[in-house]
Amino acid sequence: MATVRLERITRQFQNVTAVEDITFEVPGGEFWVLVGPSGCGKSTILRTIAGLERATSGHLYIGETCIDGVPARQRDVAMVFQNYALYPHMTVKENLSFGLRMRRTDPKTICERIDRAATALDIAHLLDRKPKQLSGGQQQRVALGRAIVRQPRAFLLDEPLSNLDAQLREETRAQLKELHQQLRITTIYVTHDQVEAMTLADRIVILDGGRIQQIGTPLELYDRPVNRMVATFLGSPPTNLFYATYDGVQFDLEGQKLPAFPLDDSSTNALQSFQQAGRGIEFGIRPEDVELADTERGQIQVEVSIVEPLGRETLVRAAIPSRSAKTPPILNFLTSPAVRLTPGERVWVRFPSDRLLAFDPQTGKVIENFGSKTPPLRLSSGQAF
Ligand SMILES: Nc1ncnc2c1ncn2[C@@H]1O[C@H](COP(=O)(O)OP(=O)(O)OP(=O)(O)O)[C@@H](O)[C@H]1O
Ligand SMILES: [Mg+2]
């Protein structure tokens, strides 16, 4: 179980800085996920660790060894790409064993490792087939198996499930997680799918524009995002954002008044400085944290536009009536399926102050502990999702 450490890695292509100042350390045996929008630098980081890309500056370590100048072949890491290529003329078994045979591993060990990987990935019945006799999902699992049997010091997986349909993706994701629990090989997994990141990761590294935004357990990132990007990237539908002004007493949200709530000193200072600069504040709230309320307890009124029953809950899309904006801000929230709402109906909602996130509208940075003195974590920090 080797640690993988990146120290201030930057990669430039001519005038494009693909990744900048990337530092993190994956402890041996952990499963980390790099996530972020297309072009944020995920593959560049992975390819740099694999030795397929050279860092412009910075250092890389596996265990205690610096591997900056070590060729890809000698790094003892296995990488699986989105566009894997199996050897078409070999059977599944031959594909799985190829790397081990090249390394002159003894046949008994090869058999044992293939048995174990094939059972875990549910491809044991396919060992004598050729790749073209397999479905896309089966081929993908063989590609994963081929990396697994090598038992490398680290696995680097770049969107390995993206060719699969939704159901297969979920199944393979679960198999991968189970396999990791058995083998405990340090894994770095790249995806742009936030659900995959949340469900697989011990820790998530969230990237945007080639830079790390935040590192943490899935729930830490979900509950305590450091900025607007993290808050809106994780979770579906995403965190609602809306802009409000503050007059020193209460907030004004498109002409509706949101009463102020107790704030700690640093939040009060932040608000005052925005006010002095003639700026408002950006609020964020997750759809599951918005509460339907009666007239008395309600804070703002919204107009229901779309009702989407999801089974266990209902997703309501509502407009915040606006005097100024051409298209009114939209508020998504979840209700119990027992609540029947119809498009056009006006309802009251409230935002529990301890669930409300507040951002500096200019920088997008979160104002810490806004509206609550205790951090809004649902589980203790450090606990995996
Ligand atoms: N060989 C290259 N030459 C020039 N620019 C490159 C090269 N490889 C990557 N880039 C640029 O670096 C940035 C990061 O690319 P990268 O492939 O790492 O993104 P990614 O996060 O993996 O995206 P995706 O989710 O689309 O796979 C992009 O702006 C990309 O255009
Ligand atoms: Mg990529």
Image (spheres, rainbow, N blue to C red):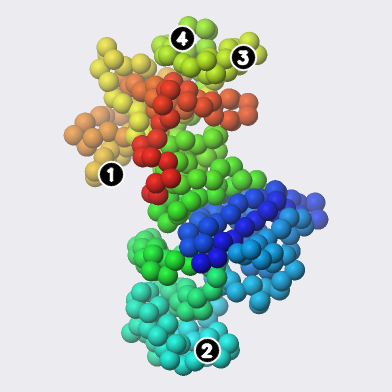
Q: Position of residue 45 (x, y in %)?
A: 64, 58
Q: Nearer the viewer, mark 1 or mark 4?
A: 4
**What residue sits right under mark 2 in the picture?**
105
**What residue sits right under mark 1 in the picture?**
310
Q: How far apart, in angstroms, are the residues tagged by discs 1 and 4? A: 36 Å
Q: Earlier in the sequence, mark 3 or mark 4?
A: 4
In front of the other: 250 or 370? 370
Q: How far apart, in angstroms, are the residues tagged by discs 2 and 4? A: 71 Å
What is the three-letter code of the residue carrying label 4? Gln
In this view, 334 is above or below 161: above
Farthest front residue? Answer: 64
Q: Is residue 132 left or right of residue 271?
A: left
Q: Earlier in the sequence, mark 2 or mark 1?
A: 2
**What residue sits right under mark 4 in the picture?**
250
What is the three-letter code of the residue carrying label 2? Thr
Q: How far apart, in angstroms, are the residues tagged by discs 3 and 1? A: 42 Å
Cβ atoms under marks 3 and 4 closer than 8 Å: no
Q: Earlier in the sequence, mark 3 or mark 1?
A: 3
In this view, 63 is above or below 90: above
SS class of the residue under badge 3? helix
Q: Would you say residue 177 is visible in this rendering?
A: yes
**What residue sits right under mark 3 in the picture?**
273
SS class of the residue under badge 1? loop
